[in-house]
């Protein structure tokens, strides 16, 4: 009898501890995201990239993930539905009602693209983890106009990324962005932050010395007063519309003083009426011998101290 009583007590203690552990894990996940939300404990783990999808339409909304070269890519949509996908096509999901959901990804893919025409992707909740083989962030968040926040160290687990082309194009609600300085294999910043009109700061890019284009990189980023140093990016061949429409910019960013790679500076600073100081004289053939496209480089930059002396066609 005494042994039976002792066994009963031990079982009670064990089940109580287990129950408390499960409760703590579940509450931790809920409180981390904020209430209310729709998810399941198994859908969110320490080895998944977790993002917030906020559906405000009472009738629900669609959202899609398009991977490239995916193998056993697990997409937990956050409403109890889970997809296991292998391939390189669009994987779509319909959320049936207004809700806040934790989308979680894990598995293998070389690229992840979120198709967000209804602007429901609102946050990246964790760093990118649980995903292997990622090398491209081509258009990953493009046109996610409700995306407001991402961890500063979003890319801290990645070493082989080679493109940030159009990664945050049109993310008009975001005010700042993750560190990219460790992604030294990146070779293009083509339209990377274009039309990010609420952004007031941008990450350092001076370590990305393999970059060869700054085509429209910060075009129409109209809230920022200053922009990253690019003087170390000596392989850049185009500054086409790089800072076009950056109307709050007060000074020309730190640029290279000479370059044999640069061929196109058309519309580079066009419309930047608040920019002060003196221009970079790209027309100096000794320092920039290979520029062949230069129309409207400084059009509308009337606050430059040497605006009157900028050659015809460059303004």
Image (tube, rainbow, N blue to C red):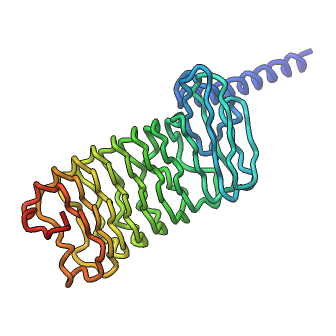
Q: Is residue 295 left or right of residue 44?
A: left
Front position in the image: 291 or 68: 291
The quadrant of the picture occupied by the N terminus is top right
In-front residue for pair 29/295: 295
Residue 72 x %, y %: 75, 51
Q: Is residue 22 above or below residue 2?
A: below
Count of marks overlaid on the render: 0
Q: Is residue 71 above or below residue 208?
A: above
**For residue 282, which quarter of the picture?**
bottom left
- The quadrant the C terminus occupies is bottom left
Q: Is residue 302 above or below residue 222?
A: below
In-image side of 220 versus 35 (left or right): left
> Residue at coordinates 37% horizontally, 46% vertically from top-left?
196
Residue depicted at x 86% and y 22% = 7
**Residue 10 on image: x %, y %:** 80, 23
Task: Please tell me which residue is depicted at 42% across the width and 62% down the height of the picture.
Answer: 189
Whole-percent x, y for residue 144 in the image? 49, 41
């Amino acid at each position: 009898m005494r042994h039976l009583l002792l066994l009963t007590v031990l079982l009670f203690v064990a089940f109580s501890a287990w129950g408390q552990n499960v409760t703590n894990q579940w509450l931790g996940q809920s409180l981390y995201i904020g209430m209310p939300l729709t998810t399941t404990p198994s859908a969110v783990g320490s080895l998944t990239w977790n993002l917030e999808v906020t559906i405000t339409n009472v009738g629900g909304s669609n959202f899609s993930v398009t991977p490239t070269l995916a193998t056993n890519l697990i997409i937990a949509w956050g409403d109890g539905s889970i997809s296991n996908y292998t391939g390189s096509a669009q994987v779509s999901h319909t959320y049936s009602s207004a809700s806040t959901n934790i989308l979680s990804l894990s598995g293998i893919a070389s690229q992840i693209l979120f198709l967000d025409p209804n602007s429901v992707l609102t946050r990246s909740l964790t760093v990118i983890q649980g995903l292997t083989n990622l090398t491209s962030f081509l258009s990953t968040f493009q046109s996610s106009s409700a995306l407001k926040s991402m961890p500063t160290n979003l890319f801290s687990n990645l070493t082989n990324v080679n493109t940030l082309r159009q990664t945050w194009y049109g993310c008009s609600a975001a005010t700042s962005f993750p560190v990219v300085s460790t992604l030294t294999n990146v070779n293009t910043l083509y339209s990377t932050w274009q039309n990010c009109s609420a952004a007031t700061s941008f990450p350092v890019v001076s370590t990305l010395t393999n970059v060869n284009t700054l085509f429209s990189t910060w075009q129409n980023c109209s809230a920022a007063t200053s922009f990253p140093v690019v003087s170390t990016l000596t392989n850049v061949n185009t500054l086409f519309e790089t800072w076009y429409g950056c109307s709050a910019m007060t000074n020309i960013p730190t640029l290279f003083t000479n370059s044999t790679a640069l061929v196109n500076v058309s519309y580079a600073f066009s419309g930047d009426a608040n920019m002060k100081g003196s221009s970079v004289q790209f027309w100096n053939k000794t320092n920039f011998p290979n520029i062949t496209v230069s129309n409207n480089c400084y059009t509308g930059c009337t606050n430059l101290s040497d605006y009157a002396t900028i050659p015809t066609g460059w303004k």
